[in-house]
Image: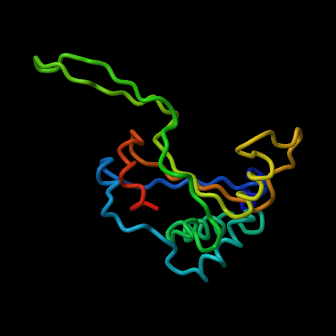
Amino acid sequence: MQHLAANVIRPIAIMLATIVAATTAADACSVSQTPLAPKDRRLCQTLLEKVRVPSALPLDAYEAALNDFFQNWCHRDRDGGWQVDKGVRDTGPYTSRLERVDGKWQWVGDYHGTHTPVAIWYSPDMVAWLRRNRPAEGDGPAKPPAVPDGAVMVKEMYPAPASACVSGCAGLF
């Protein structure tokens, strides 16, 4: 079991997820929020070397390094080349309908996303691979190479709908 990460998570690409805890969209996406940034860049560089290769550590040591990586906001290292989506985005449609509630007509909304809205952070290796193999304009290679070992994508999740975060994105990132 100690090397479960080596057997289950193939170190071609590591996809990691974090959840930004929030009670309401207004709280989670507040413009007044201070952007969360890496606390210690040297520590983050050391941790990144560990989390990029899960098979190099016993599972408990890998999980501890991964926990430290996220607790120190290491994936938000813009100076280190990490990039983030333009903003928080929904993962499915948000629909509304007009309903009579307590004798008054009002719009009631339902979120139909796969999961809550997200913002994705990309490591420099992942950004380079995406630009070469999934270009915004034109076609990428017919048979793109595998994502490089150690390339990382981190999914942060926010309360629905994503539109509640639009005015607060500058404060989040």
Q: How many marks?
A: 0
Q: Nearer the viewer, residue 56 or 12?
A: 12
Give the residue displayed 53% in from the left and 52% down from the top: 86
Give the residue displayed 78% in from the left and 40% down from the top: 138
Q: Nearer the viewer, residue 91 or 17?
A: 91
Q: Nearer the viewer, residue 118 or 137?
A: 137
Give the residue displayed 52% in from the left and 51% down from the top: 119
Q: Is residue 153 left or right of residue 112?
A: right
Depicted 21 relative to depicted 40: above or below: above
- The image quadrant that residue 100 belongs to is top left
List x then y, in percent, for residue 53: 75, 65
> Which quarter of the rendering shows the N terminus?
bottom right
List x then y, in percent, for residue 88: 47, 48
Depicted 43 relative to depicted 91: above or below: below
List x then y, in percent, for residue 101: 16, 20
Colour scheme used in the picture?
rainbow
Residue most extreme to the left: 103
Depicted 124 relative to depicted 26: above or below: below
Q: Is residue 87 left or right of residue 125?
A: left
Q: Is residue 37 left or right of residue 16?
A: left
Give the residue displayed 23% in from the left and 17% down from the top: 99
Residue most extreme to the front: 137
List x then y, in percent, for residue 13: 74, 54
Residue most extreme to the bottom: 42
